[in-house]
Amino acid sequence: MRVVLAEDLFLLRDGLVRLLEAYGFEIAAAVESGPELTRALAESKPDVAVVDVRLPPTHTDEGLQCALAARRARPGLPVLVLSQHVEQLYARELLADGDGGIGYLLKDRVFDAEQFVDAVRRVAAGGTAMDPQVIQQLLARSSADDRPLGRLTPREREVLELMAQGRSNAGIAAQLVVTERAVAKHTSNIFGKLGLEVSDDDNRRVLAVLAYLDGGPR
């Protein structure tokens, strides 16, 4: 699996390259700036891009904007964004096109090698990998806006958070120490209360929930 990596801090970039290579990834390019990222994404045609939000020369949201432009040129290009802090605006921009293959992780997560590599693989496969803190803030904002989210029970909210992170029903059941049948029931209730169509496609299901949290059904 070919990866384009964009991170301006040399030590972190070098560490991520070594980590990904150790897990069998091929590093198509490892760059440190927005212009280099744009070229690498166009020329290398990677299976997934792992991108720091803030890159030179602007050190604002250069990395995110380059990744979004690449997704417009190549719809569905899998992108995993790394950020130092939770920025809801970045999460909303990343979710805006409704396609799969997206992730948003805080940089702290990269220190858990298995969790980080699992996120890269999940995004590359067209799934989602959203940081729990991002999901919690989106949930809090949606609740404050008095959306139908307020109808969910505490357990349904827990299930929704795990769904939004990209967990399967089996993964949610293991995390909450309940049966898959119980998770399926909670999931059905969530979709009913949020007015979302039930789908067997896990990625489509997660994206529908995230889209709802980000601004209502589309």
Image (tube, grey):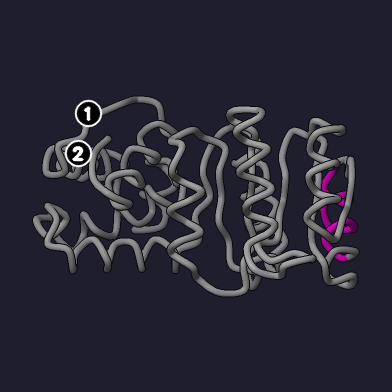
Indicate the quadrant where residue 89 lies: bottom left
Q: Position of residue 10 (x, y in %)?
A: 90, 70
Amino acid type, callout 2: Phe
Circles 2 and 1: CB distance less than 8 Å?
yes
Q: What element carries label 2?
A: helix
Q: Is mark 1 on a helix, strand or loop?
A: loop
Span colored in magenta: 15-24
Q: Distance between the residues labelled 2 and 1?
A: 6 Å
Q: Name the residue under label 1.
A: 197
Residue at coordinates 66% horizontally, 46% vertically from top-left? 67
Work out which quarter of the rendered image holds the C terminus and state it: top left
- 186, above or below 56, in the image: above
Foreground residue, 58 or 108? Answer: 58
Q: Is 78 inside the magenta-drawn segment? A: no
The dominant secondary structure in magenta is: helix
Residue at coordinates 58% horizontally, 30% vertically from top-left? 76
First of labels 2, 1 by sequence position? 2
Residue at coordinates 64% horizontally, 73% vertically from top-left? 108
Give the number of the disc on residue 191: 2
How many numbered badges does the structure rendering display?
A: 2
Foreground residue, 24 or 96? Answer: 96
Label 1 crowd (10 A; few <14 / some 14-19 / many >=20): few
